[in-house]
Image (cartoon, coloured by chain):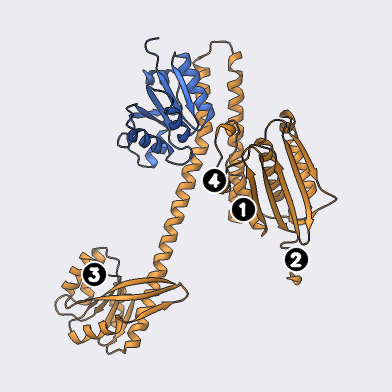
Amino acid sequence: MDDIRLRVLVADDEEGMRLGIQRTVRPFRAVLSDLGVETTFETELAETGEEAIERIATAAPDILLLDYKLPGMSGLDVMARLEADKQDVLVIMITAYASIETAVAATKRGAYDFLTKPFRPDELQAVLKKATHHIIAHRRARRLAEEKRQVRFEFLSVLSHELKAPLAAVEGYLFQLRDRTMGDSLEPYGPQVDRMLIRLDGMKKLIFDLLDLTRIESGQKERDLSDVDLADVARQALETMQPEAGQRGVKMDLHASGKVLVWADRSELEIILNNLVSNAVKYNHDEGHVDVTVESAGDHVAVRVKDTGIGMSPEDVGRLFREFVRIKNKKTRNILGSGLGLSIVRKLVDLYGGEISVESRPDEGTSFLITLPAACGREGDRDHV
Amino acid sequence: MCNSKCVLVIDDDQDILDQARAILEAGGHEVLTALNGQEGLAVLETRAFDIILCDMMMEDIGAGLSVCREIKERGLKIPIYLVSDIGNLSMQNFDVRAEGFSGVLQKPFSANELLAFIK
């Protein structure tokens, strides 16, 4: 449990009331088990509304226990002033007579709760506990919302950077073409044109990946679940990568005995396998190997994609599944990617209640292992759960 | 060439590095490149440079800033220019000179723009 200490200001013109409240509040511990918090209170006392305002201006308390009927500034005046000063203090109004009019007026001004004089210590403590719960829950919600905004801002900053980078590269090459920096013959510009096409391709891939990611996260994608042969999906992924692998002499092998059935959306499994196999080829050495093993293991299926490539440091492995993380160093400088592939893979694996793990050694290679429940979400299977 | 300068370009985009190198070398300058801030700082220890061009968002969002601060901390007097685009800077309320950069080179750049900048 977290210990939290809140400050309570008591504004009442009767000394007996002030001291009585203080005696009740000081030893009180509000245990909020649902929030995992234990709260204690320190008290300050003010005789008049003016004094309360002054104290709040110097150091705002968390809770104000405010007498409705004060000499000079009334309780309502104090609340109006707090509102004008944009002071965020939770107010509990203490009234001598519980009239509807007082309640309405105070609520309009934003009082959180009421205590009717005379009250027992346990009544005061109950009101205080409720107020404390409200304050802490509210603060947590606000912090969470701020964190979300921050995450979103960072995501958009990085996304706009990733979208602008290929544009800047292409524009740079086009400037050279326009200005004929290498002469009027088109020939020397050939490699630049190739680079432009590659960068535009990368940009297209980023946009597709982004759409995939958004669809998965929003749950908007219609899922077409059926018995899918994971070995067949893997075979197809290898075929897709064959041209690039062949060019670089990377040898790919599939190890699977018969069908390996999993209850899934085929297109989602394709995204997983295509990403892993494509990484295994891209981050491989020329003449390297990629081994894909697909097998059933009880009520799970497992797929391992192992390469003999450039591998990663433990720090890189730790960052691997985050959005837009691309491992950039001398060895990867010519490898293009959206930086979203593995983040998508992990989200999909999570969706199936599966697991993904990585083993990697620099210059030796990387091995991804994914296990998925064979029948996650299958109707007939619910009876067995 | 008497105006020849030694330039260090730090950017995580290989194409931008290739372009800068092609343009600057054709203009008679000497060019070394680095793909991230750490690499750039390592290259800085190997020899003297007349000017540094540095990208902002590399291994992390403010990598260029870290490079700039480290250079100042090492007491190096080499002018370091931020290579970036206006959109990103205004979004982050970023004051280039207050952060220690000598100025900004807009990305993308043409050969003339880059060569004029280096002069």
Q: Amino acid at mark 3?
A: Ala
What residue sits right under mark 1 in the picture? A347
Tags 4 and 1 both on a single chain: yes
Q: Single out the residue that lies furthest toward the left.
A: A72
Q: Are marks 4 and 1 in contact (CB under 8 Å)?
A: no
What residue sits right under mark 2 in the picture? A379
Q: Nearer the viewer, residue B17 or A177?
A: B17
How packed mark 3 is, by other alpha carbons closer than 10 Å (few <14, some 14-19, many 20 or more), is some
Distance between the Cα atoms at labels 4 and 1?
21 Å
What residue sits right under mark 3 in the picture? A80
Instruction: Name which of mark 2 and mark 1 comes first in the sequence.
Output: 1
Chain B colour as displayed: blue
Tags 3 and 2 both on a single chain: yes
Picture residue at 20% right of the left edge, 87% below the top? A16
Where does residue A26 sit, x and y in percent of width and height?
29, 80
As helix, strand or loop, the secondary structure at mark 2 comes to helix
Q: Nearer the viewer, mark 2 or mark 1?
A: 1
Q: Amino acid at mark 4?
A: Glu
Distance between the Cα atoms at labels 4 and 3?
55 Å
Q: Is residue A63 left or right of residue A157?
A: left
As helix, strand or loop, the secondary structure at mark 3 comes to helix
What residue sits right under mark 4 in the picture? A315
Where does residue A107 sit, x and y in percent of width and height?
32, 75
Distance between the Cα atoms at labels 2 and 1?
22 Å
